[in-house]
Image (cartoon, grey):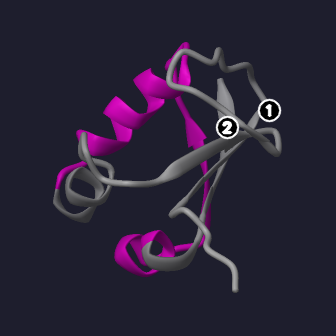
Amino acid sequence: MKLKLLYFARLKDAFGRDHETLESDAASVGALLAELRARGGAWADELAEGRVFRVALNQELATADAGLATGDEVAIFPPVTGG
């Protein structure tokens, strides 16, 4: 299935892009994150277990077990603090 991925803040800088379209067979957000980690390098470092980041699926915060469908938009970003 085709997914639109968006990256923000430090992740955008680390990955060298702010978005991409990805063909994936990942059935869930967790499976997609595992697929991205498998790229190695900054992907494995920034998306490692224990690193703090959030995932939104179609502009709603999502958990690792959230299911994916073709055309979904997945945003990955660090937590945001305000002041």
Residue 16, position as x, y percentages in the image: 43, 78
Q: Quadrant of the C terminus?
A: bottom right
Which residue is found at the position 32% from the left and 50% from the top?
47
Q: Are marks 1 and 2 in contact (CB under 8 Å)?
A: yes
Count every numbered label the image shows and give the total: 2
Of 78 and 25, which appears nearest the observer? 78
User: Residue 38 lies in magenta, yes or no?
Assistant: yes
Q: Residue lying furthest front in this view?
A: 83
Per the rendering, the mark at residue 71 is 1
Amino acid type for the residue under numbered disc 1: Gly
Estimate the spatial distance between the alpha carbons at disc 1 and disc 2, rounded to whole Å.
5 Å
Q: State which tag comes first along the sequence, 1 or 2.
A: 2
Q: Write the start and end of the magenta stretch as one range.
A: 11-40
Which residue does the numbered mark 2 point to in the structure image?
A: 3
Of 65 and 18, which appears nearest the observer? 65
Name which quarter of the figure residue 42 lies in.
bottom left
Up/down of 64 relative to 67, above or below: below
Of 64 and 20, which appears nearest the observer? 64
Amino acid type for the residue under numbered disc 2: Leu
Label 2 crowd (10 A; few <14 / some 14-19 / many >=20) = many
Label 1 crowd (10 A; few <14 / some 14-19 / many >=20) = few
